Amino acid sequence: MAVASDSGRSRGKSADELPVLEHLGELRRRLIYCIVFLVIAMGVGLFFAGSVIEFLKTQPPAKDITWNAFAPWEPIRLYMMFAFIIGLAASLPFILWQIWLFVRPGLRPDERRATVKYIPAGVILFLLGLAFGYFVVFPMAFYFTSSVAQNLNITETYGIAQYFSFMLNILLPIALLFELPIAVMFLTRIRVLSPARLRKLRRFAYLALVIVAAFVTPPDVISDILVSVPMIALYEASVLMSAWVYRRRQAEDEAWEKRWADAEPEAAD
């Protein structure tokens, strides 16, 4: 009996673990697709990286700078940095699509139609984040560091790789933060988040956003406020969007249950 019982438990355990293993295998496959697509997009981005770099060199504050390379590999490093950013921007729709395909089996048909619409919105918000970082945050950070150097009578000699690394280290986190509303709406739709949970986490979210703003801006209060306020507003917009998605999901659930309740007597007849 003990042997039979152990065998039954083993069969039950294998049956329970199989879906988990299938999900992990599916996740691995989607990650491989994303990485392969990103690498291909980076290869294409190498052809455009030079043109993008030349254009940015003609824009303020870069247009008044004399460029230097402090190591033979720095131009290659610069090309690779911009190839990655271009490749990431080009791959974002595909990456979001793969995420949607991964969670799609657990969604009802109406939820599938609703969540797939988040993909173009996610791309638009990413580009808006890049624009906000480049036109608002980056100039503040650059001119602040330049004013400090002038006050200390330091001659500024910029390495081109260091300049653009400084810029991209600001732009990329902000662009990813701009994905917050779409991520929140998507997670609310698939029942991972709720408006109540987001309101409960508000204090911790505010603290995290202020810390991020302090890292990507100059160490002065005005710059921190100018970046923290839009980030906090973005979080509050995410809470409102989550509440909207939550109400729509509840209404759809009620309609779905009503349809099934109405269908049951007919099936019984």
Image (cartoon, helix red, strand yellow):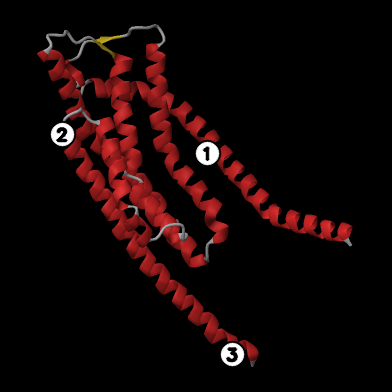
Foreground tag (3 vs 2): 2
Vertical order, 113 against 149 (above or below): below
> Going from the N terminus, do you reach mark 3 or mark 2 first?
2
Residue type, numbered disc 2: Val
Circle 1: element type: helix
Residue type, numbered disc 1: Cys
For mark 3, does the 10 Å Cα neighbourhood hold few (<14), some (14 to 19), or many (20 or more) residues?
few
Apparent side of residue 26 relative to residue 97 in the rendered image (left or right)? right
Vertical order, 30 against 19 (above or below): above
Q: Which residue extends farthest left?
A: 151
What's the residue at 49%, 61% (across, down)?
112
Apparent side of residue 263 relative to residue 4 in the rendered image (left or right)? left
Residue type, numbered disc 3: Pro
What's the residue at 38%, 58% (across, down)?
197
Vertical order, 53 against 111 (above or below): above
- Residue indicated by mark 1: 34
Would you say the residues marked 3 and 1 are in contact, meaning their CB atoms lie under 8 Å apart?
Answer: no
Residue 236 picture location, percent across and down: 26, 54
Residue 211 picture location, percent across and down: 28, 37
Residue 191 picture location, percent across and down: 46, 61
For mark 1, does the 10 Å Cα neighbourhood hold few (<14), some (14 to 19), or many (20 or more) residues?
many
Q: Quadrant of the C terminus?
A: bottom right
Whether residue 98 is visible, yes or no, is: yes
Residue 116 picture location, percent across and down: 45, 56
- Residue indicated by mark 3: 265
Circle 3: element type: helix
> Going from the N terminus, do you reach mark 3 or mark 1 first?
1
- Residue indicated by mark 2: 221
Would you say the residues marked 3 and 2 are in contact, meaning their CB atoms lie under 8 Å apart?
Answer: no
Q: Quadrant of the N terminus?
A: bottom right
